[in-house]
Image (spheres, grey):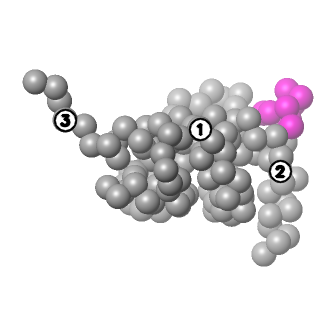
Amino acid sequence: MKPEYRRADRVSSEIREIVALILTRFSAEPALGRLTIVHVNLTDDLKVARIFYTVFPGEDPRQYERLLNRYKGLIRKEMGKRLRMKWVPDLAFVTPSETGEGVFQHNIPPSAGKEEKMGRPSSSSLMDELENEK
């Protein structure tokens, strides 16, 4: 007998892959490519997707949350092009530490915080801009 899978579980894994792809290729805000989408929790009626993400240690996840919420509509639009569903779920971006559902650990190399020295674009100017918007 085949194991039973909820449709919400299948769709949530597809949403996780799609959102991760969108964020890595989103050229307007290179800082979004630095996020890691770790889990998507989709309601049974497929109307709301809670997307759990992490950032590099030492960075403020609330700044990224503001950035994600700013581009939520664009992310949903791109999801709609890739998802094979009649309706695209509403998105809610949260960090695992906000919900008390545990912190996801990542093996991050010691050189991960040295992007500026390696010639990669820095997200510090973007984060400064977000701080000034408050």
Q: Where is residue 91 in the image (x, y as percent from the top left)?
A: 54, 58
Between label 3 and label 1, give the one nearer the viewer. Answer: 1
**In the drawing, what numbered circle is on residue 82?**
1
Answer left or right for 128 relative to 98: right
Q: Which residue lies furthest to the front in this view?
A: 86
Front residue of 71 and 76: 76
Q: Disc 3 designates what residue? A: 4
Q: Within 10 angstroms of label 3, few (less than 14), some, or many (20 or more) residues?
A: few
Residue type highlighted by circle 2: Ser
Q: Is residue 86 above or below residue 3?
A: below
The alpha-carbon separation of the residues under discs 3 and 1 comes to 25 Å
Q: Disc 2 designates what residue? A: 124
The alpha-carbon separation of the residues under discs 2 and 3 comes to 46 Å
Range drawn in magenta = 114-121
Q: Position of residue 119 (x, y in %)?
A: 89, 29
Q: Residue furthest left?
A: 1
SS at badge 1 = helix
* Secondary structure that dominates the magenta span: loop
The alpha-carbon separation of the residues under discs 2 and 1 comes to 31 Å
Pick the quarter of the image with the C terminus.
bottom right
Label 2 or label 3, whichever comes before in sequence order: 3
Q: Is residue 83 magenta?
A: no
Pick the quarter of the image with the N terminus.
top left
Going 43% across and 37% down the picture, which residue do you hit? 13
